[in-house]
Amino acid sequence: MAEPALIPQVESLRTSSGTFSLTPATTISYVGEQAADVAELLGSYLRPATGFDLRVTDGKSGDIRLVQAKPDEVDDAGFMDEAYHLRVDKDVVLLKADSSGGLARGIQTLRQMFPANIFRNERQVDDANWDIGCVEIHDKPRFRWRGMHLDVCRHFFSVDEVKDYIDAVALHRMNICHLHLTEDQGWRIEIKKYPKLAEIASKRAETLIGHERDRPRKYDGSEYGGFYSQDELRDLVAYAQQRRITLVPEIDMPGHMVAAISAYPAWGNYPGNRMEPRCHWGISQQVLNMEQSTVDAMKDILTEVMEIFPSLFIHVGGDEAPRTEWSECKRAQERMAELGLKSEEELQSWFIKQMDDHITKAGRRLIGWDEILEGGLASNASVMSWRGEKGGLEASEQGHNVVMAPSQWVYFDYYQHEPASEEPLAIGGMSSTAHVYSYEPIAEKMNEDQAKLVLGTQGQLWTEYIPTYRHLQYMAFPRACALSEVAWLEKDKKNMASFLQRLNVHRKRLEVMGINAHPQPRG
């Protein structure tokens, strides 16, 4: 059989003669306690289209065998060893890994080896062919952090849609799903101690029509809202964990807080001013005040977030927080004096350090957008570099971990194909699939020590101009496919021509999964 068209490509692959056939009698077995739910996951992937029972048992007797060599362990950044070895012979499929994370990556490779109809949710015809060619694969990722971001605030997505998104992330052997949960336009997470965040801050009166720069502004006149209960979020966490995907929650502060201040005016710099969640996009001038009561409230919120999300990293945003209010508000200036601070930049840095201390005491690690560098970086913080590579360079020079997410390369809310006038309305910019594929997360100016501090890279999906899930898919794919290969393969193994050829085959998988991918590019 032909060499399988895998995305991302694997480190090494050797084909041999013969095929393995999935049949009604096929069984799946596992070795290693933490391998059990991965084996069950594989069965759940293969049953719908085949209609086969695919019994899962403990031990080494299965026709498809998952073997975990060691108990799961994580490094100082919370990541497992994800290397795996997959061997397909005529009679047996053997998948070995040191960790359950490696097994989880390996079953995604195995899925892609079957005909694309294996991804269907209903049984196929009785004489469907479920053969795969005999191969031996050795594989491991280049970067530990291989992520996709999802803004559920500007536009809200259901639990089932987020699960579908997690499945698409998992298919591409990525391991991070970053959920942006709070915004000026809507607060999307239930906080028990502050119920008005769900009751008031989760709803806006209407939504902008057209682009933010259009004048005069027009609105649709329809209330828009939604939030996730804590039980729903725990369900999402469990769903992701079975796929060995880490959900990284983001509570953006001290900016992007208009919705929250609408619910709790005492958190704002002008508590007497009535506010409502914003109905248009762009950067708001309103930010949190720095009173101890407000700082404590943010810590309360993060405590509840950490009770829901086991992720080592907790994202606190820190981006696009104008300091105008702090500069002009008398009480904010008095607060600066009380704290012995000499600038508004130092005030924001002080605030982030309060959050860093709180998160660190809980045994977690703070991560924020690169603005958290301004005024001095908190001692335990990691940086997500979005305004180009500068933030990543500065943070790594100071000895901090970084995730490279520069907007010019990996912001998937940008246009992706020329002419932009023929594409759905987007925020602007241009980042084609080829452009994404050409991205190198290790900046040229980084030395060897700095390069070691780069955890990986991540694609962003800000949803101001993405109102539906099908539109989200259109913006994400196939650019996410390209990014998965950037994050997985060593730089010298990337090959755009090969990627495009494999993408032609991969498109059928995406189509069968119901993913509304952009039709370009094609090999």
Image (cartoon, helix red, strand yellow):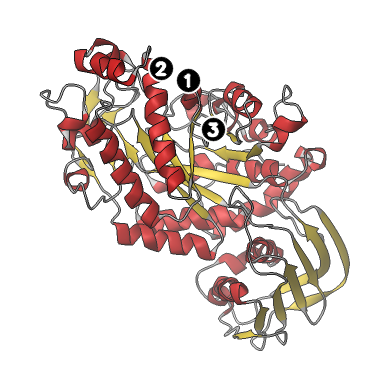
Q: Dot 1: within a 10 Å radius of its alpha carbon, few (fewer than 14), some, or many (20 or more) residues?
A: some
Q: Nearer the viewer, residue 250 or 425?
A: 250
Residue 287 is drawn in which quadrant? top left
Looking at the rendered structure, the kind of residue marked 3 is Val
470 shown above or below 31: above
Tell me the residue that label 3 is attached to.
383
Q: Which residue is drawn at the image coordinates 41% and 31% (left, top)?
A: 352
Report, in whole angstroms, how far the alpha carbon at label 2 lies from the one at label 1: 6 Å
Residue 366 shown left or right of residue 34 in the figure: left
* Mark with earlier residue (3, 1): 1
Helix, strand or loop at label 3? It is strand
- How crowded is the residue under tag 3: few (<14 C-alpha within 10 Å), some, or many (20+)? many
Mark 2 in CB contact with mark 1 (< 8 angstroms): yes
Where residue 356 sits, quadrant-wise, is: top left
| Residue type marked 1 | Glu
Q: Is residue 444 above or below residue 168?
A: above
Residue at x 67% of width, y 65% of height: 99
Q: Which residue is drawn at 23% across and 43% down?
A: 202
Q: Nearest the camera: 515 or 269?
A: 269
Q: In this image, 505 relative to 174: left or right? A: right
Quadrant occupied by the N terminus: bottom right
Relative to 378, does residue 21 appear above or below in the rendering?
A: below
Residue shown at 56%/45% (left/top)?
147
* Spot occupied by residue 54 in the image (x, y as percentages of width and height): 60, 83
The residue under label 1 is 374
Q: Do the residues under discs 2 and 3 have CB atoms within 8 angstroms?
A: no
